[in-house]
Amino acid sequence: MAVKVAAAFILMLFFLSTACQAKLSSSFYDKSCPKAESTIRTAIRAAIARERRMAASLIRLHFHDCFVQGCDASILLDETSSIQSEKTAGPNDNSVRGYEVIDKAKSKVEKICPGVVSCADIIAVAARDASAYVGGPSWAVKLGRRDSTTASRDLANTNLPSFTDSLDKLKSRFQKKGLTARDMVALSGSHTIGQAQCLTFHDRIYNASNIDAGFASTRKRRCPRTGGQANLAPLDLVTPNSFDNNYFKNLMRNKGLLHSDQVLFNGGSTDSIVTEYSRNPAKFSSDFASAMIKMGNIRPLTGSAGQIRRICSAVN
């Protein structure tokens, strides 16, 4: 009897698990809002056409959302008496961008399907469309996320990677989110189209020993020893507007702009992955898409959890 009960319990857990996993589906809006993805895509392409840098910003926005409370659009919530906005957390403040692009995409979707498509799903679709627009991979985005009614500035300050992190620290942060070292290196490859503020790489170009001297000298032009902390510089000088594998070639030449970039190739356990991606752009592209799908599945709210916000910056 006990064996039968145990077997039935295990079977019940299996079906519950399967049901939970099935809630995210690339066909989630096929009936409720069939033009959702095309509407989002049009808004994203228009934003990137106006400013190429926005592609990297939208990919980063998705990353910074998923690493805090899961992929629930908590990063979009503004400060209120009951919400401590993640926008003002250290890793996000005056750094993360693209909020207004998501807001615009949401408003367009609301016009055709009011109260149907979540802000969390729009962020996920926007990241995919941003990648594809600048020559990166595309992938089928699993949809069905719902939006959080809370945010956590504290978790944003503690969970998000820092430009000063060691390799072990980075691996630990990603591992806690269910992502492997390979996922981490692949996701870091999106830096090939990113930009960074002088304050994030100032110490490296003036004090690091594992940096190409000519590269450091070039970077000092945009990042003086004193002042200019908000000055922007492309993470990849060679092809800053194209999603390619040049980021990894740079690391192998000690031309990683951020400390947290160069630690991926500095005699450690991820050197071989960087080498592989530098030689095989197709493998990098494939792994990046797979890692983005995995990241997009971090603790989504589904079913009756959370809500579908009408305005992404505020709880209904």
Image: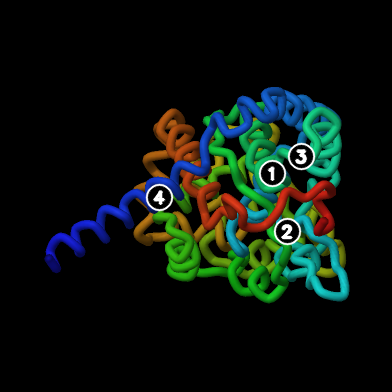
Quarter of the figure with the N terminus: bottom left
Q: Amino acid at mark 1?
A: Ile
**What whole-number distance in Å separates the C-alpha atoms at marks 1 and 3?**
16 Å
Q: Determine the residue located farthest toward the front in the rendered image.
A: 1
Question: Total number of numbered labels?
Answer: 4
Query: Residue 214, can we see it?
Result: no
Foreground of the two, 197 or 98: 98
Q: Tell me the number on the disc at residue 123.
A: 1
Q: Residue at x 79, y 46 (%)?
A: 98
Q: Secondary structure at mark 2?
A: helix
* First-in-chain label (4 vs 3): 3
Foreground of the two, 272 or 40: 40
- CB within 8 Å, label 4 to label 3: no
Q: Tell me the number on the disc at residue 75.
A: 2
Is 165 placed above or below 272 here?
A: below
Tag in front: 1 or 3: 1
Query: Residue 38, can we see it?
Result: yes
Q: Secondary structure at mark 4?
A: helix
**What whole-number distance in Å separates the C-alpha atoms at marks 4 and 3?**
25 Å
* Residue holding disc 4: 182
- CB within 8 Å, label 2 to label 1: yes
